[in-house]
Image (cartoon, grey):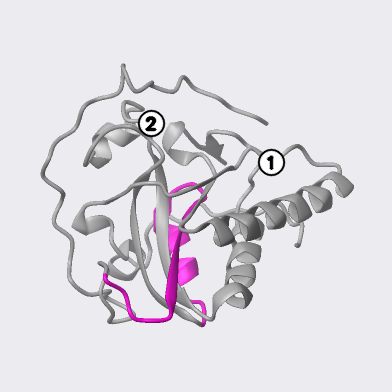
Amino acid sequence: MFFKPPMPTADTALVGRDQAVETPNLHRVLGHSLNAPFPPNTESIQLGMGCFWGAERRFWQQEQVVTTAVGYAGGFTQNPTYEEVCAGQTGHTEVVLVVYKGGAETLERLLALFWESHDPTQGMRQGNDSGTQYRSSIYASSPEQLQVALASRDRYQAALTEAGLAEITTEVKDCIQLYYAEDYHQQYLDKNPGGYCGLRGTGVCL
């Protein structure tokens, strides 16, 4: 079911702050830097699919993924806090930054995992989690990556339509500013193995 709470605008969103939050230097699981510059011959993409805790774990488990980090993107507020994002005052959604090697072939596999691991038809919610911060999104880092993402969306829509499911509501855009989430959110399910993970797919494969 498509769910759409009110989105703030550039005029009504919180202004934010100049100071970015502190993040750890290294990924707890993969051991690589959470921050750019990333290793040569890697690419990055931001993926939003509901609560970012479980989504980040899903991607750090994949071959060819060099590092991951969670953050806020797609809104207006500069360097927002988790509380501000969850209050719906920033316009941001929760995303996972995925840095990977292997080019287009790896990207296709990661996008298949993205589509199949959540329900991209629900608007601004995933399951019982509702709000602007839970909307589905793909934020590409290059025009080429954007075209691959759009093509994968169209293929998955065809599969969903054949299965009798609704239209995809996922935002697919390029060159979106990422604001890193607070330290305690980074690799949260490695720190808290029994923590909440709300990932639920549609059962439709790409």
- Is residue 188 depicted above or below 78 in this figure? below
Is residue 180 left or right of 56 when viewed as pictured?
Answer: left
Q: CA distance from mark 1 to mark 2?
A: 19 Å
Check disc 1: other Cα within 10 Å, few if <14, some if 14-19, many if 20+: many
Q: Amino acid at mark 1?
A: Ile
**The furthest residue to the left:** 19
Is residue 65 left or right of 28 when viewed as pictured?
Answer: right
Tell me the residue that label 2 is attached to. 91
Image marks 1 and 2: residues in contact by CB distance under 8 Å: no
- The kind of secondary structure element at disc 1 is loop
Check disc 2: other Cα within 10 Å, few if <14, some if 14-19, many if 20+: many
Residue 16 belongs to magenta span: no
Is residue 180 left or right of 49 when viewed as pictured?
Answer: left
Q: Quadrant of the N terminus?
A: top right
x and y percentages locating residue 31 in the rendered image: 28, 82
Q: Nearer the viewer, residue 172 or 81?
A: 172
Q: Which residues are magenta?
A: 37-63
x and y percentages locating residue 141 in the rendered image: 45, 58
Q: Earlier in the sequence, mark 1 or mark 2?
A: 2
x and y percentages locating residue 192 in the rendered image: 31, 65
- The kind of secondary structure element at disc 2 is loop
Q: Nearer the viewer, residue 55 or 155?
A: 155
Tell me the residue that label 1 is attached to. 168
Q: Quadrant of residue 206?
A: bottom right
